[in-house]
Image (cartoon, rainbow, N blue to C red):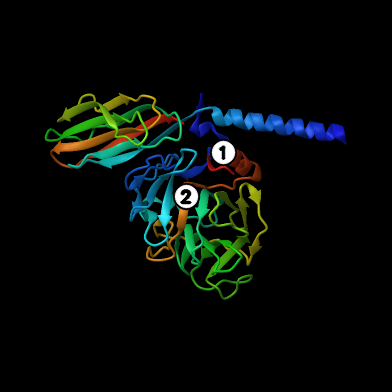
C-alpha cells in the first residue's frame, strides 16, 4: 500500500511539473481583422496591461483599399512603467496608393503595454485588413 | 516554438476573447474565425486582478458584450456539439444573470445563465429554445434545459460546458464534472440573433453582475481531461 501511495505521489509530481513546463512555454498566437479608418486615432492592436512579459512579433496592415486621396498615419507606442502613459516610439505617414500594398511593423517585447494605432488625416474612410502575431 | 493552433485544446475553437486590450470599447477574437467587432456596450470596466491579469467587470445594470448575428453565424448551434469555457467571479443579484447566449426566447438558440432567486441554492442552467412546443420528454414546453447547482458567488471559478449534439450537456466547475439535472435537452432551432455576453437577448434586462475572463467557445465536446489541462494552466492567475 505504501509503495502504491509513493507511486501515486510521484505521478502527481511529474504531472504537476509537466503542466508547469507547458504553461511556461510562450505560445505563438495570432489575431486580426479589419479596421475602418476615421479621423479619430483608433487602436489597430492593443495590449494595454499584459499580465507578464509580453512578446509581440509583427503586425501587417493591408493598404489595398487606399486610393490617391487618402493619407493615413500609423503610430506605435509602448508603456515602460505601470500606470503611466504609452510612449510613442514611431510614426509613419502613408499618402496615396501604396507600393507595396502590405506594410509590416516589427514589434518589441514589453511588460506594461503596447499600442499600434491608425488615423486618417485626409480622404475617405477605407477598410484596412490587419494581422498580428505575438507570443503569450 | 509552440503555436496557438498546435495546442490540442485549441482544436475547433471558434471564439477566444482573452481581453488583452485592457482599454476601449472593442475586444478581439484570437481564435481562427476572428469574429470582428466584438463590442463592449455601456463600458464594462477593465480591471487588473492581483496576479496582473486583465479582466472585465460587469455592473449588473447596463454592461454587456455583443457580437452581431451576421458575424456569428458559426455559433448558431443546433444538432452540433459545442463547448463553452469562461472564468467567472459571479455576484448574486437574485436575478437571471445571463452569462452568454445566442437565442430568442421560446423560438430558437441557446443560453447559459445563473439563478438563485434569493435562495441558498445557486443554479447554472443551459437552456435551449424551440419553435412551438416539444414532444416528450419535455412535452408542452418551448424550452428544454439542464442545470447544475452549488455555484458560489464572489469566488473565481472556471466554468465549462460540454454539450453533445442530440444529447445532454455536462457542466464543469474548476474542471470537476458536476451532477446534472435535466429535463431532456433537445437540439435548439436555428437562430439569427446577436451573440450576447452578460445580458438577455433583448439587451435590456437580466444583466450579469461580476467579473469575467476569456470566454471561449468550441464546436466540439471538450473532455474532462481537456478541461483539467486548461484549468491547471490558468488557475494560478486566479489563486484557485
Q: Which mark is residue B212?
A: 2
Q: Residue at x 47, y 55 (%)?
A: B210
The answer to whether residue B180 is left or right of residue B43 is: right
B107 versus A90 height, above or below = below
Distance (Cα) linking label 2 and label 1: 16 Å
Of labels 2 and 1, earlier in sequence is 2
Q: Position of residue A45 (x, y in %)?
A: 33, 36
**Badge 1 element:** helix
Mark 2 element type: strand
Name the disc covering residue B132, or none: none
Q: Residue under circle 1?
A: B236
In the displayed orientation, state which residue is furthest to the right. A1
Q: Position of residue B183 (x, y in %)?
A: 63, 67
Q: Where is residue A90, by image quadrant?
A: top left
State which quadrant residue A85 falls in: top left
Tell me the chain of label 2. B
Tag in front: 2 or 1: 1
Q: Residue sitting at 20 percent across and 42 percent down?
A: A40
Amino acid at each position: 500500500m505504501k509503495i502504491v501511495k509513493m507511486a501515486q505521489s510521484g505521478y502527481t509530481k511529474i504531472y504537476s511539473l509537466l503542466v508547469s513546463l507547458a504553461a511556461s512555454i510562450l505560445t505563438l498566437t495570432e489575431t486580426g481583422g479589419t479596421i475602418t479608418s476615421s479621423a479619430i486615432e483608433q487602436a489597430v492592436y492593443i495590449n494595454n496591461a499584459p499580465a507578464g512579459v509580453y512578446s509581440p512579433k509583427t503586425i501587417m496592415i493591408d493598404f489595398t483599399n487606399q486610393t490617391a486621396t487618402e493619407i493615413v498615419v500609423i503610430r506605435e507606442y509602448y508603456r515602460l512603467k505601470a500606470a503611466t502613459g504609452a510612449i510613442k516610439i514611431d510614426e509613419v505617414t502613408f499618402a496615396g496608393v501604396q507600393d507595396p500594398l502590405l506594410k509590416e511593423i516589427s514589434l518589441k517585447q514589453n511588460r506594461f503595454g503596447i499600442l499600434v494605432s491608425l488615423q486618417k488625416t485626409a480622404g475617405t474612410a477605407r477598410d484596412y485588413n490587419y494581422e498580428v502575431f505575438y507570443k503569450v | 516554438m509552440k503555436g496557438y493552433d498546435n495546442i490540442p485544446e485549441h482544436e475547433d475553437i471558434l471564439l477566444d476573447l482573452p481581453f488583452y486590450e485592457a482599454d476601449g470599447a472593442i475586444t478581439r477574437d484570437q481564435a481562427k474565425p476572428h469574429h470582428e467587432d466584438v463590442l463592449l456596450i455601456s463600458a464594462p470596466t477593465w480591471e487588473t486582478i492581483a496576479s496582473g491579469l486583465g479582466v472585465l467587470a460587469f455592473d449588473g445594470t447596463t454592461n454587456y458584450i455583443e457580437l452581431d448575428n451576421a458575424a456569428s453565424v458559426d455559433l448558431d448551434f443546433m444538432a452540433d456539439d459545442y463547448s463553452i469555457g469562461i472564468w467567472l467571479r459571479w455576484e448574486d443579484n437574485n436575478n437571471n444573470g445571463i452569462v452568454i447566449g445566442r437565442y430568442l426566447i421560446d423560438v430558437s438558440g441557446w443560453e447559459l445563465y445563473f439563478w438563485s432567486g434569493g435562495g441558498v441554492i445557486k443554479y447554472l442552467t443551459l437552456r435551449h429554445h424551440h419553435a412551438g412546443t416539444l414532444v416528450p420528454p419535455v412535452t408542452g414546453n418551448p424550452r428544454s434545459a439542464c442545470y447544475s447547482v452549488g455555484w458560489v458567488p464572489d469566488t473565481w471559478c472556471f466554468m465549462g460546458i460540454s454539450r453533445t449534439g442530440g444529447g445532454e450537456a455536462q457542466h464543469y466547475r474548476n474542471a470537476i464534472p458536476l451532477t446534472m439535472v435535466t429535463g431532456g435537452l433537445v437540439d435548439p432551432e436555428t437562430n439569427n440573433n446577436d451573440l450576447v455576453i452578460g445580458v438577455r437577448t433583448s439587451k435590456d434586462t437580466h444583466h450579469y453582475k461580476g467579473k469575467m475572463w476569456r470566454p471561449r467557445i468550441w464546436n466540439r465536446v471538450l473532455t474532462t481531461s481537456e478541461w483539467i489541462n486548461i484549468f491547471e494552466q490558468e488557475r494560478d492567475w486566479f489563486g484557485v
